[in-house]
Amino acid sequence: MARSATFGQLIRETLSGHYFVFGGPQDRVEIASGVVLNDALLNVSSGGITIGEHTFFGHGVSLLTGTHDIAQFGLARQRAIPAEGRDIRIGRGAWISSNATVLGPCSIGDDAVVAAGAVVTQDVPPGAIVAGVPAKIVGSCKQA
């Protein structure tokens, strides 16, 4: 990744649309230059999100670091949210298609493609194409 930007720089340098940061401090989000987020939801309740340069999202993408403790019940489950450890890292040049959901902790490699509606629950290698629920490798991006 080239460099991280402050939140103010993000507004000036990113074609962001109207994305929404939920669940924690905005300094948990690092977005490189040339990123297109459209109307993404970035949930940083339980970790940070890093997005590499020239990565782009379709509409309705959700990056979710937050989770709840399923061993708890009722109000205890609702409030049992880990503070960290579920980071999401997306490399440069990745394409996250419309309505995809990425659940942390995981890493999506450089130039990977996540198909529309996919649910990513584990690491995606660089250049891989993943699809499905849960997302599985269905192909590879090859440069000519």
Image: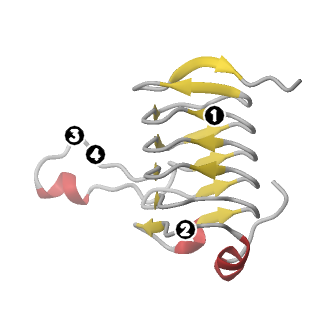
For image coordinates 64% across by 38% down, the residue present is 108
Spatial CA span between label 3 and label 1: 34 Å
Question: Is there CB contact under 8 Å for labels 2 and 1?
Answer: no
Q: Which mark is residue 15?
A: none
Amino acid type shown at disc 1? Val
- Find the distance from the CA under tag 3 to the CA under tag 4: 5 Å
> In which image quadrant can residue 94 be found?
top right
Specify which label sits upstream in the sequence, 3 or 1: 3
Check disc 2 and report the residue beneath it.
17
Quarter of the figure with the C terminus: top right
Question: Depth-wise, is mark 2 or mark 1 nearer the camera?
Answer: 2
Contact between labelled residues 1 and 4, with CB atoms less than 8 Å apart: no
CB contact under 8 Å: marks 3 and 4: yes
Name the residue carrying label 4: 69
Per the image, label 3 sits on a secondary structure element best described as loop
List the residue tagged with mark 3: 71
Q: Secondary structure at mark 1?
A: strand
Is residue 82 shown above or below 129?
below
Foreground label between 4 and 1:
1
Residue 43 at least partly seen: no
Q: Which residue is painted at 47% across and 52% down in the image?
A: 59
- Pick whichever, 69 or 111, lies toward us: 111
Mark in front: 3 vs 1: 1
Residue 75 image point, x, y percent: 13, 58
Considering every residue shown, the one lying at the far bottom of the view is 8
Q: Earlier in the sequence, mark 2 or mark 1?
A: 2
Query: Which residue does the numbered mark 1 point to in the structure image?
Result: 113
The Cα atoms of the two marked residues, 4 and 2, are separated by 33 Å
Is 37 left or right of 121, judged from the image as shown? right
